[in-house]
Amino acid sequence: MAKKILVIDDDPVTVKYLETVFNDNGYETCSAADGVEAFEVTKKERPDLITLDLEMPEEWGTRFYRKLSKDKAFKDIPVIVISGMASRHLSIKNAVAYLSKPFDRDKLLGIIRGAIG
């Protein structure tokens, strides 16, 4: 069974790109446009890894991450921050990696393979 990656980003172009890259490399995907929707999708889909944008409408990635890390069922899901915000990664100390937009596709895939295979 393929590992599932939740893509959280408010930019539909970024979501489509990431989903295509992940699907082409054997991963299943699901997505959410903000932190509120992302928590619901996390409960429903139970992803193996999450890519997380920080600046989004409704609920920013940092607030979503705080909720996620307090929930025993989800706190161990690896999170990769992919954001255009240069220094906000400091607010998510336990992220597996932090990539600035634009990011290197091969580097991202290497990080994912290291985190979930």
Image (cartoon, rainbow, N blue to C red):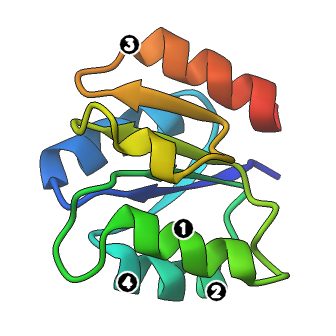
* 102 relative to 70, above or below: above
Question: Is the Cβ of the residue at disc 4 closer than 8 Å to that at disc 2?
Answer: no
Mark 2 vs mark 3, CA separation in Å: 29 Å
Numbered mark located on residue 49 in the image:
none
Q: Is residue 57 left or right of residue 36?
A: left
**Closer to us: 94 or 101:** 94
Question: Is the Cβ of the residue at disc 1 closer than 8 Å to that at disc 4?
Answer: no
- Residue at image position (27%, 69%) is 33
Q: Which residue is mark 1?
A: 65
Mark 4 vs mark 2, CA separation in Å: 10 Å
- Residue at image position (27%, 31%) is 86
**Closer to us: 86 or 30:** 86
* 56 relative to 25, above or below: below
Q: Which residue is mark 2?
A: 43
Q: Helix or strand or loop: what does disc 4 sit on?
A: helix
Numbered mark located on residue 37 in the image:
4
- Residue at image position (34%, 51%) is 53
Looking at the rendering, in which quadrant would you find the C terminus? top right
Question: Is the Cβ of the residue at disc 3 closer than 8 Å to that at disc 4?
Answer: no
Q: Which residue is mark 3?
A: 104
Q: Earlier in the sequence, mark 1 or mark 2?
A: 2
Q: Earlier in the sequence, mark 4 or mark 2?
A: 4
Q: Is residue 71 left or right of residue 92?
A: right
Mark 3 vs mark 1, CA separation in Å: 23 Å
